[in-house]
Amino acid sequence: MICPNSHIAAMAPYALADLEPPQGKRLISLAQNESAISPSPLAIKAGEQALAGAQLYPDPEWCELRASIAQVHNISAQNILCGAGSMEIIASLVQCYASPDTHVLSSQYGYAFFCSASLVVGAPYDQAPEDDMTVSVDALLGTVHSSTSVVFIANPGNPTGTRINRADIVRLREELDDQILLVVDEAYGEFAEAPNEPIFDLVERGNVVVLRTFSKAYGLAGARVGWGLFPPGIAREVRKVLNPNNISCASQAMAVAAMMDQAHMHHICAETTSRRNQFTADLRQFGLTIPESHTNFVLIRFEDAVTAQRADHALRAEGVFMRGMAGYGLPQCLRATIGEEKDMNFTRDVLKKWFNVENSK
Ligand SMILES: *Cc1c(COP(=O)(O)O)cnc(C)c1O
């Protein structure tokens, strides 16, 4: 018998979305926080053109991509690393800075991949309580201990959609021990740009990493491109762990063109935000609770776990797949990505009908 390492054998498989619609129903997937809007047409064209050079390995230094990111964000290209999605960067950071003897800390509803990446290296994963489904700096500071080596926060958060201010992040950094690495995952940062003050300058402190992705606001989840701004010493270590040829030539070309088409990204964010606000207002009218979201999804809270499960069944019967949240300790919640406008209206109508039947029992 071939035996895996015991800490891998002990892990559950990563919980992927279940997306099998009933026979005869069209799938409406609201389960994976993908953009309902296609990537920039310029990105599609650039990707097609890059395919002709696919006999060569892609640029291992992501030169054009880093230059385009640096230009748009007014940061130094030198300190940017790119990953096959920000997930690759998260995993590499954990490989470099956590171990069975050093703990990773995040918050109660922290992004599930922070935990899986920690378990892969056998690092204990601690969680600080949240306050009203929002990251609590005080709780993080109260949970950190002498073995904590990395703190991860997603801001805005997934699956909550809530966010904390720059001032809160600065306070977290200042009150944490200087030897602890703080990673701020801004996968949804572009959706929160209006209230969000940039935090890239915090990286200069030498112990902060800021992560972004092309998967959400740029509509490029299938291209697998993420990036981060790093202190030079940390970039050097993480680079050793990343796959040296991690992002395909087509994906790099798509990401460059997408970054240079900021108007399209703003269009995706504005359109998604407007649909989200309408969907939220509609659902709140039925008495459902939804925390204020700064992302491309909403977290819908039902009365209890059984009610959420009944709603989920009613939705699935019509082909609408949201994401169950039992894995996050939120069995009374479903997370719904903001999709096409007609699909959101359909989803609202399915829920409304279900609600009327539910309340007439
Ligand atoms: C979607 C998401 C990511 C992005 O992962 P990619 O690998 O870049 O697709 C990272 N962090 C959070 C919190 C997310 O929700």
Image (spheres, helix red, strand yellow):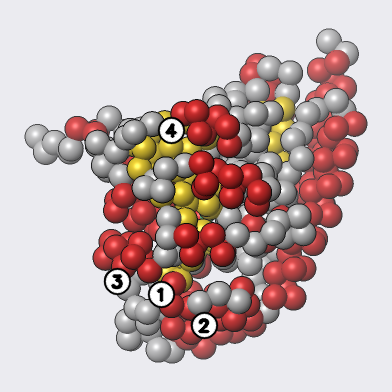
Element carrying mark 4 = loop
The amino acid pointed to by label 4 is Val
For residue 285, which quarter of the picture? Answer: top right
Residue assigned mark 2: 67
Left or right: residue 60 versus residue 112 is left
**Spatial CA span between label 3 and label 1:** 11 Å
Percent position (x, y) of residue 280? 82, 40
The image shows residue 134, relative to residue 93, as above or below, that is above
- The residue located at (48%, 78%) in the rendering is 77
Image quadrant containing the N terminus: top left
Q: Earlier in the sequence, mark 4 or mark 2?
A: 2
Residue assigned mark 1: 248
Percent position (x, y) of residue 271? 80, 60
- The residue located at (78%, 29%) in the rendering is 289
Q: Nearer the viewer, mark 3 or mark 2?
A: 2
- The residue located at (43%, 89%) in the rendering is 52
Residue assigned mark 4: 144
